[in-house]
Amino acid sequence: MANVDRPNGFTPVGTINGGPWTGKVRQYVTDGGEALFKGDAVAIDADGKVRPANAAEDVLGVMVGVIPTGGLQSGDFLTTGNLGAEEHPGYAPAGSSTAVLVAVGPDIIYAVQDDASGSAAADEFADLNLNMELTPTTGSTTTGRSAHELSRTSKNTVTAQFRVIGYDSAPDNDATADNAVYHVIINEHTLNEGAGS
């Protein structure tokens, strides 16, 4: 059966210890250089601001929401309000600094589609414990959803951004076909690096 080509970026679906993801997030501010969409893998720069991650760099987490103007209180992690949520619901537009919510737990499992490059898995176990890089693609300004995917051609046993731990169990997800939905954890996580930035 063919899978539907419907990239949605990364969606938290649980934790590595078998528990549910309970929605724990941290607040950050975008650098405003590029739009950031719900489901985008996120990188953090030396100035503490976040942006969409690129392939082959450490990943801080996944953007899961935008903070409304005035939504952050004094004493929170950051106190910069959103400058664009009303005009662009669901995503942080380019050109303005926007407060966003990022799921940063290194133990979070995400569901994410592959980009149909390279060869599909031989069976539902073939890609387990392999690593893959990100295919960063700009999301939808209509839906606010990410278009980030996994690069199937990057599957390997050496270090890469994401570790495959399984496949989504939805009945319409065929692990042996293009656009399969994988379950992954962040392998190259910013918070697990020894050096700060």
Image: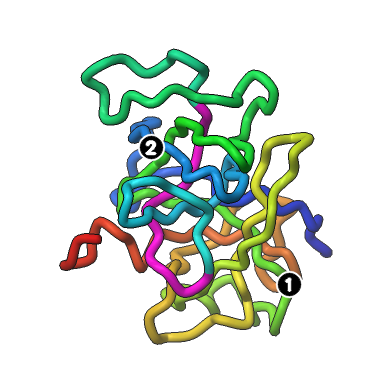
- Residue at position x 62%, y 67% in the image: 135
The residue that mark 2 highlights is 28
Q: Residues within 10 Å of mark 1 (few under 14, many from 20)?
A: some
Is residue 63 shown in magenta? yes
Q: Amino acid at mark 1?
A: Ala
Determine the secondary structure under disc 2. strand
Q: Is residue 191 above or below residue 19?
A: below
Give the residues drawn in magenta, as a range: 55-66
**Local crowd at mark 2 within 10 Å, few (<14), some, or many (≥20)?**
many
- Quadrant of the image for the N terminus? bottom right
Q: In the image, is 39 to the left or to the right of 193?
A: right
Quarter of the picture containing the C terminus is bottom left
- The first of marks 1 and 2 along the sequence is 2
Q: Label 2 sits on what residue type?
A: Tyr
Task: Please state the horizontal and vertical placement of residue 103, each as a whole percent of the image.
Answer: 40, 41
- Look at 58% across and 40% down and name the residue there: 38
